[in-house]
Amino acid sequence: SIMSQITCDEARTIVLARYYTEWEDIVTEPAVAEVGYENSDEWLMIVGAREFIVGGDPNYRILDDAAYIVNKRTGQLEITPMYLMSKDRYDSFVKYGTFPIWLQ
């Protein structure tokens, strides 16, 4: 039987649980977008302050160089610096979901 794959929502839950533990700002709240990027094997999730991710407030935009990637088969979370991601891997991701204008 074909194993069921991790959904975007499940990936979001996995990333948020970890992201919360790393969040140090007491004024804002961490968030993971309901949209993201995917390839055949992985989810690449969009993280940041709730004010930006959900509310679109540019004052809360975080330029974070870490990529939060969830394996679709195992649910394993990988956090890797963007600049270490190969171009082939980066180029393999396509948008998933309807992106709000501020996340384009």
Image (cartoon, grey):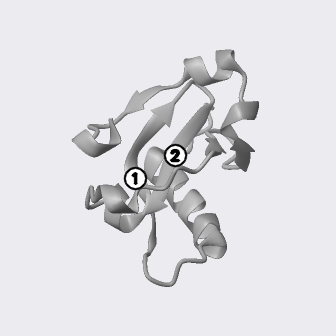
Circle 2: element type: strand
Q: Is residue 36 above or below residue 14?
A: above
Residue at (66, 15) in percent of width and height: 88
Q: Is residue 13 above or below residue 27?
A: above
Q: Is residue 100 visible?
A: no
Q: Is residue 59 visible?
A: yes
Q: Nearer the viewer, residue 64 or 77?
A: 64
Residue at (28, 59) in percent of width and height: 57
Locate the C terminus and report the quarter of the image it occupies.
top left
Residue at (66, 18) in percent of width and height: 87
**Image quadrant in which you'd find residue 19:** bottom right
Mark 1 residue type:
Ala
Q: Is residue 39 above or below residue 15?
A: above
C-alpha separation, residue under disc 2 versus residue under disc 1:
7 Å
Residue at (47, 59) in percent of width and height: 48
Name of the residue lying farthest toward the bottom: 26
Q: Which mark is residue 4?
A: none
Q: Provide the residue designation for mark 1.
A: 33
Task: Tell me if 53 is positioned left or right of 31 in this view.
Answer: left
Locate the N terminus and report the quarter of the image it occupies.
top right
Q: Provide the residue designation for mark 2.
A: 45
Q: Position of residue 94 (x, y in %)?
A: 45, 24
Q: Nearer the viewer, residue 49 or 44?
A: 49
Mark 2 residue type:
Met
Callout 2 touching callout 1 (CB < 8 Å):
yes
Q: Position of residue 67 (x, y in %)?
A: 63, 44
Q: Position of residue 42 (x, y in %)?
A: 61, 34
**Image quadrant in which you'd find residue 59:** bottom left
